[in-house]
């Protein structure tokens, strides 16, 4: 847990280098560290080998669509991932769409938090289209984005079919 350290991109790159020896890591929390796209890219390119990773929290950073795209391509290999927190970043429709495209192999994912980003209708619709792959999903947070009626309706129409869903939040869009 390295929360609230304001390490930035250069610190994230250094941490990524140090993480190469910890392939059995199960939890990685870098919440609120001013990490941008280049720092996120370094981290996720390292953790691609962490096949046991269950929890990834890169929330409250400065990750945009470029970082989200790299995250998406890396997490698709993390088949044990149960919790993914990317809330309060700068992820827009492009990044959200790429993350949605990574859902195919995330069969264990139970919590997905993309709240407080810049996701609009097209990103929400892409997420809605891919949600059926997340059969273990229990919690979805998309609140405080830029999702309008089209995206909210697409999400709601899919989520009503989820048997295990315990929490979903799309308010404040």
Image (cartoon, grey):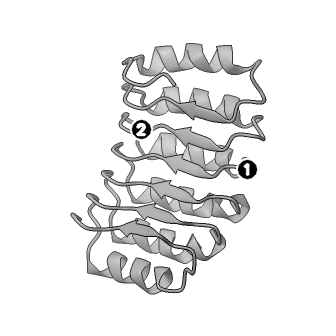
Badge 2 marks a residue whose secondary structure is loop
Residue at 44% over, 47% down: 65
From what the image shows, is residue 121 above or below residue 111?
A: below
| Outermost residue toward the left in this view | 172
Mark found first going from the N terminus, 1 or 2: 2
Residue 152 horizontal/vertical position (percent): 33, 77
Crowding at dot 2, Cα within 10 Å, few <14 / some 14-19 / many 20+, comes out as: many
In this view, the residue in front, 36 or 165, is 165
Residue carrying label 2: 63
Residue at 41% over, 38% down: 63
Residue 155 horizontal/vertical position (percent): 42, 77
In this view, the residue in front, 159 or 35, is 159
Badge 1 marks a residue whose secondary structure is loop
Residue at 47% over, 53% down: 95
Crowding at dot 1, Cα within 10 Å, few <14 / some 14-19 / many 20+, comes out as: some
* Nearest-to-viewer mark from 1 and 2: 1
* Image disc number at residue 107: none
Q: Which quadrant: the C terminus? A: bottom left
Residue carrying label 1: 80
Residue at 62% over, 35% down: 27
Residue 69 horizontal/vertical position (percent): 54, 47
In this view, the residue in front, 17 or 29, is 29
From what the image shows, is residue 139 above or below residue 52?
A: below
| Marks 1/2: CA–CA distance | 23 Å
For the image, the number of numbered tags is: 2
From what the image shows, is residue 153 above or below residue 45?
A: below
């Amino acid at each position: 847990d390295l929360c609230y350290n304001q390490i930035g991109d250069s610190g994230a790159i250094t941490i990524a280098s140090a993480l190469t020896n910890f392939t059995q890591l199960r939890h990685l929390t870098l919440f609120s560290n001013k990490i941008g796209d280049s720092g996120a890219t370094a981290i996720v390119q390292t953790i691609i080998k962490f096949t046991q990773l269950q929890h990834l929290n890169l929330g409250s950073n400065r990750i945009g669509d470029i970082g989200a795209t790299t995250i998406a391509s890396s997490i698709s290999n993390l088949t044990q991932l149960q919790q993914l927190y990317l809330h309060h970043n700068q992820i827009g429709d492009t990044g959200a769409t790429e993350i949605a495209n990574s859902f195919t192999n995330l069969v264990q994912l139970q919590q997905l938090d993309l709240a407080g980003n810049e996701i609009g209708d097209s990103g929400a619709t892409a997420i809605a289209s891919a949600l059926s792959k997340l059969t273990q999903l229990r919690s979805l947070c998309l609140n405080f984005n830029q999702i309008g009626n089209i995206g909210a309706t697409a999400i709601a129409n899919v989520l009503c079919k989820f048997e295990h869903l315990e929490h979903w939040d799309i308010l404040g869009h």
